[in-house]
Image (spheres, rainbow, N blue to C red):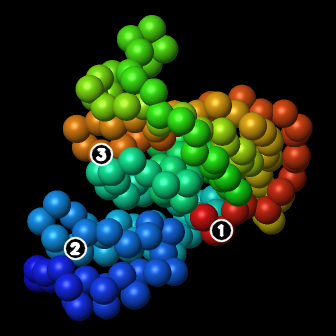
Amino acid sequence: MRVSTGPALLAACLITLSSTTGCHSDNNGTVEAALAQSTALNDAPEIDPVFHSRKPRTCPVVQSPPNSAQAAALVQCFTEMKTRSWISLMQNVSIQIGQSRPFSAAIDRGDAHIDPSARVITFTGSASQYMCMTVDVTNQGRSCNSKDIVNAAGTCFKTAAGYQCNLPAVGTGFHPYLAPPTTF
């Protein structure tokens, strides 16, 4: 279904006002992309039966420079992972968008899919990184450890598939025997 600009766009914007993505139309004046993005950022987390935590976040497609909330979701989905024996999740992600800068081959060389013609967005971020083990009778309700990531420098950059955001997972403070996170 295609919705054109005007009253229909205003109605869609009002519906998405409480979302983290804001309201905008794509280049064709339609709201499908904005609504799909809003849905992806606001989907309820699915609980993993092995870890009793939420599953890693699925990445929404963000085609324009992300705002703070979008960047936080992109940090989660590009950082989180699951193996047979553990799951790593980012919680309480807080992003303060900084200045954008041109691509630098020296600084950005580790990001193979980066669009060198697009500006790189810098940010400062904080989060709690959880590492949870499979749940059994000995660790039920306390199968996770976490560390604090505070005031870390991160970047968002454009790829052919959309924006990707990275926050280095270098942290301090060790918090053992925590309950698995179940929310984003």
The amino acid marked with disc number 1 is Thr
Question: Where does label 2 land, which residue?
Answer: 32
Mark 3 to mark 2: distance in Å?
16 Å
Q: Which label belongs to residue 84? A: none
Helix, strand or loop under label 1: loop
Is the residue under label 2 in contact with that under label 3 (CB below 8 Å)?
Answer: no
Rendered image: mark on residue 182: 1
Q: At 37% across and 58% down in the image, what residue appears?
A: 60
Residue at the extreme front of the image, as rendered: 6
Q: Which amino acid lies under the numbered mark 3 shown in the image of this protein?
A: Gly
Residue 12 place in picture, x, y as percent: 31, 85
Question: Is residue 169 at all visible to an observer of this figure?
Answer: no
Q: Is residue 78 above or below residue 62?
A: above
Q: Residue at x 38, y 11 (%)?
A: 105
SS under mark 2:
helix
Labelled disc at residue 162: 3
Mark toward the viewer: 3 or 1: 3
Looking at the image, can residue 172 be seen?
A: yes
The span from disc 3 to disc 1 (Cα, nearest Å) is 27 Å
Write the residue at 31% across / 31% down: 118
Q: Residue at x 87, y 53 (%)?
A: 177
Q: Earlier in the sequence, mark 3 or mark 2?
A: 2
